[in-house]
Amino acid sequence: MPVLIKGGTVVTAEHSMRADVLCRDGLIVAVGENLEAPAGTEVVDAGGQYVMPGGIDPHTHMELPFMGTIASEDFFTGTSAGIAGGTTTIIDFVIPGPQQSLLDAYRTWRGWAEKAAADYSFHVAVTWWSDQVSDEMGVLAREHGVNSFKHFMAYKGAIMVDDGVLLNSFTRALELGALCTVHAENGEAVFHLQQKMLDLGITGPEGHALSRPPEVEGEAAQRAISIASVLGAPVYVVHVSTEQATRAIARARAAGHRVYGEVLAQHLVIDESVYRNEDWATAAAYVMSPPFRPKHHQDALWAGLVSGQLQTTATDHCCFCAPQKAAGRDNFTKIPNGTAGIEDRMSVLWHHGVNSGRLTPNEFVRITSTNCAQIFNIYPRKGAVAVGSDADLVVWDPEGTRTISARTHHQNVDFNIYEGMEVKGKASHTVSRGNLVWKDGDLRTVKGAGRYVDRPCFAPPMRAIERRNEERKPTGVRRAPAVDVTP
């Protein structure tokens, strides 16, 4: 059934204008004033509201096997919750175990994702290195539309990789025209500090933050950026949470390196005081990595977004319910790491960003959708309101209010990290693949309606390496004459 959104103000990353938007067969087919509704069209009155590209969350973990349990949110419930909040596309993570085939892991995640209610794509993690991994990166890039590979610099003894893996994987990704992403925490330092906290008798959730101070993120971010810069490779730093990492990204960008930074909505508004809650279960619910930080880091993150040094916003949506978190009751290192947020990201960013004057509505679109689509090469299919783009749209009510709560959210988890927060600005309607799937609180998602999104690689193989090597050829070097050493 066609959908016509009438009477709203279309807001994109580039401009705002009064226009109607007509969707049919999964695509936007017309954008203009006073559009006529074909027979059988569902009409949405967007008077007084904004019509924007659907949100793209580039960092989620649906039904992730992790730390001895499985995340409570699956691909259907998670994407449905996202739709309720205005997010219409996710990029999740395939995370192979050490020595596991990347292709085997990819096929497993693709199977899990077949139930998704909205469109999805995958980053694939490189958790070990061999010729097989190199070959499979090529297959994923060429045949399966994977243009980004993830690297964990933390979680020692599990999925952490060393600098040798980073060098090999970054080089291979550069050959393929793919983008490398990094979880930047110095895993050796974290492990050392975890043991120190336990030796001191600190076993509660507060030990999580104490064992992952801002410096371990700053060092790892700088190291990853330096390795990428040596190779001439682009790099994307996920969930930037500190002033130190933000500055490292800004310095590299100022020097001409292609570095991108992602910030989580929760790191912008929640600080480390949550770990000192007297109720263990409440404090444990906030355990995620990197942890929440002292409040002054929030100023650096907002400044990074406003200045363009940080380009995208995400959630790292990875849900674990109270009984799962309780596995770490006597040892904080065993608390499954992860929090929710896919349903609330856009409202939180609008309320604390646009309503505060930090962001314009166009900048809001840029950091919630368009930048992500461009960085991961799905623009203008996603992240745009234009003829021919996918009909993934959110009708945004800037005057709409709600109080965030686990009692009313659609996320499959028993706690909400924003519990009790009142926000102004919410999705009144969401269109996914041309279908009206959220209407004034009525969630109409269908299991399996989402589709996998191919993300082509960028540069042709070797072009970037050849250019970099050409730049580094020594010039004007006087060579010593050959010496005859024949006896």
Image (tube, grey):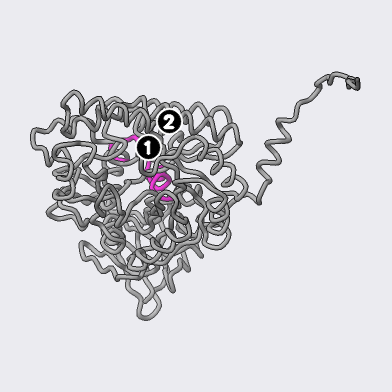
Residue 220 bears which disc, if any?
2
**Vertical position of residue 41 compared to residue 255: above or below:** below
Q: Residue at x 40, y 48 (%)?
A: 365
Q: Which region is colored magenta? A: 354-369
Q: Which residue is mark 1?
A: 154
Answer with the quarter of the image where residue 339 lies.
top left
Residue 47 appears in the figure: no
Give the side of residue 167 with respect to residue 36, left or right.
Answer: right
For residue 449, which quarter of the picture?
Answer: bottom left
Q: Secondary structure at mark 1?
A: loop
The residue tagged with tag 2: helix, strand or loop? helix
What residue is at 27 percent from the left and 47 percent from the top?
67
Work out whether residue 275 or residue 411 is closer to the camera in this orientation and state it. 275
Q: Residue at x 42, y 68 (%)?
A: 22
Which residue reaches farthest bottom? Answer: 39
Which three-letter amino acid code belongs to the residue tagged 1? Ala
